[in-house]
Image: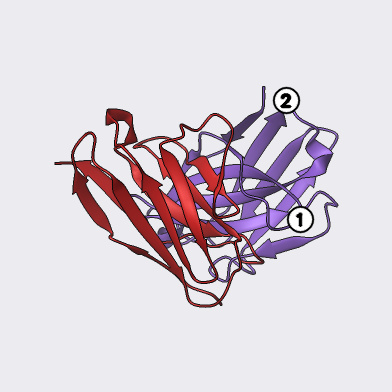
Chain colours: A purple, B red
Amino acid sequence: QVQLVESGGGVVQPGKSLTLSCAASGFTFTNYGIHWVRQAPGKGLEWVAVVWSDGSTKYYADSVQGRFTVSRDDSKNTIYLEMDSLRVEDTAVYYCARRVTSAPHPFDYWGQGTLVTVSS
Amino acid sequence: DIQLTQSPSFLSASVGDRVTITCRASQVISSHLAWYQQKPGKAPKLLIYAASTLQSGVPSRFSGSGSGTEFTLTISSLQPEDFAAYYCQKLDNYPPIFGPGTKVDIK
């Protein structure tokens, strides 16, 4: 069955870095783009970033542009989100989700999420 | 960038009620809209895509309609397991943003 499993969350100080992972299984990984979506405590969903199946096409939300970097390792069926210069407002549950690369397909499977807390 | 609004932001209803949630886009997005359900502590779950196509396995009491800038999600007869938050998402191009959400609570 399709599975997406996030890991790497934790507590980090403002200005520091953290890398999240999303391990995929149960589907042909190279056919899908993988997105990161976050949800601050008690708030709504915020799209963060995507890496397409080609591995080179990437888009970022304005709120993380220049600080976050998304990448993929197709040999490990894993997506990474490298988060630098973290801010208190980056505190959230981070979900990865898959989508057939081309619009307008939806996000049909999601991971369970990993919590990132940015606090001094 | 295109913005999405949802109304109402909070809805109190009873089991068996018919519930309608509206999502409006600030520009035309054709039928490129999805709806998700999220329960507390859980990941979002895809309900509807392409504005009106029911995702496999989703009960038929859920339906979607609309195109252009105005869309609706309808639950024909609210069930206990439907009390949750609901989000719309635009899928036409980047960024694939979400609406602010509608929380459906028990009256």
Locate residue B63, reporting x and y percent.
Answer: 46, 45
Q: Residues within 10 Å of mark 1 (few under 14, many from 20)?
A: some
Residue located 54% across and 75% down the image = B2
Identified by mark 1, the residue type is Ser
Comparing B50 with B94, the one in front is B50
Separation of disc 1 and disc 2 at Cα?
20 Å
Q: Which residue is mark 1?
A: A102
Pointer 2 chain: A
- Element at badge 2? loop
Q: Is residue B66 above or below residue A54?
A: below
B81 to the left or right of B50: left
Q: Is residue B18 visible?
A: yes
Please state if A71 lies on the left or on the right of A42 as rendered: right
Which quadrant is the N terminus of chain A positioned in?
Answer: top right
Picture quadrant of residue A56: bottom right
Of the pair A20 and A1, the residue shown nearer to us: A1
| Marked residue chain, label 1 | A
Tell me whether marks 1 and 2 sit on the same chain: yes
Number of residues whose C-alpha sits closer than 10 Å to that of mark 2, classed few (under 14), some (14–19) or many (20 or more): few
Relative to the observer, which residue lies in front, B51 or A91?
B51
- The reply to whether dot 1 and dot 2 touch (C-beta < 8 Å) is no
Q: Which residue is mark 2?
A: A26
Q: Is residue A91 visible?
A: no
